[in-house]
Amino acid sequence: RTDVAASRRNERSTTAMATTVVTTMGTCRKPLRCQGRSGRERRCRSGAMDRQAVEEAVEGMKWDADGLVCAIAQHVDTGAVLMQAFTDRAGLAETLETGLATFYSRSRQERWCKGETSGNFIKVNSVHVDCDKDSVIYLGVPIGPACHTGAETCYFNLLDKQGMKVKEGGVQKASSTTFQLEETIQERKRKAAEQNGGKPSWTAKLLADPKLACKKVREEADELCRTWEEQEGQQRAVSEMADLLYHAMTLLAIQGVQMEEVNAELRRRFGVSGVEEKATRSK
């Protein structure tokens, strides 16, 4: 167990060294204006970088022969990779100045702000640079679908050794473990509404009986606490936490709440004292 823990710490340390945070959109000092290809001006949003900081960040990049770097947009609350394109110096600068994901179209040979014509903007919370400084990640929140097809993300085709697959009745999103679980719970919810007879799954039973779901959440929370109280070990704690998360997410599904909303609320609390945050809640 000690060796595994040490390995995980090394992996986290390596990841931290390989990724440089360019900005978390600090305080804007000047009322910058950014000219889009449509001719509309977009005023620098509150919280953007000042011009000198923008210039230093842009000049620190390793631009290719065409003056471009790869730009990936990722959802800050779900972790979903939304899209991949390229950006130039002006596009990166505009992203840092306005807080809106801006790219460079190689086919049109011009800069474009995502959502400029469709309204499906991506509000950027932070910009991250890879270890070679030749690609960036725009970490933010999409306003509407990210893909031109109308899908939430451009990555909805699953490729395996059998070939390309698209999930029947929808899209196969590239999701993290937690969000794959949420999709499974939602699928059970849809099937339960359509099912006539037959033996329901455990998830379907919970969805049909909110009192049972509440009971299981309380039970699993108690079992998680007992892993510490009775010194049952780390693996037992992991197992009980997985049980608690599953049952809690099922209870959220009953109430129509998504994990994306939970993560957004957690993000809102970053940098806020827990005592102060609790005091602001309505009774």
Image (cartoon, helix red, strand yellow):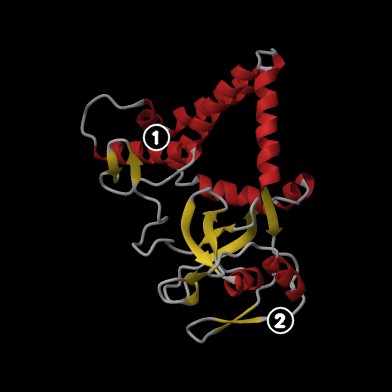
Measuring from the top left, give residue 161's x and y in whole percent.
31, 35
Measuring from the top left, give residue 47's x and y in whole percent.
70, 68
Residue located farthest toward the bottom when viewing the structure as drawn:
39
The type of residue carrying mark 1 is: Leu
- Judged from the image, the secondary structure of the residue bearing numbered disc 1 is helix
Give the residue pinned by disc 1: 207
Measuring from the top left, give residue 155's x and y in whole percent.
40, 51
Drawn side of residue 90 relative to residue 256, left or right: right
The type of residue carrying mark 2 is: Pro
Q: Nearer the viewer, residue 269 or 7?
A: 7
Q: Nearer the viewer, residue 81 or 248?
A: 81
Drawn side of residue 226 relative to residue 183, left or right: right
Q: Earlier in the sequence, mark 1 or mark 2?
A: 2
Q: Which mark is residue 260?
A: none
Q: Nearer the viewer, residue 191 or 6?
A: 6
- Specify the quadrant of the image occupied by residue 175: top left
Q: Residue at x 28, y 38 (%)?
A: 191
Q: Is residue 73 above or below residue 210?
A: below
Q: Is residue 282 above or below residue 118?
A: above
Q: Residue at x 24, y 39 (%)?
A: 194
Is residue 238 visible in the rendered structure shown here?
Answer: yes
Residue located farthest toward the front when viewing the structure as drawn:
65
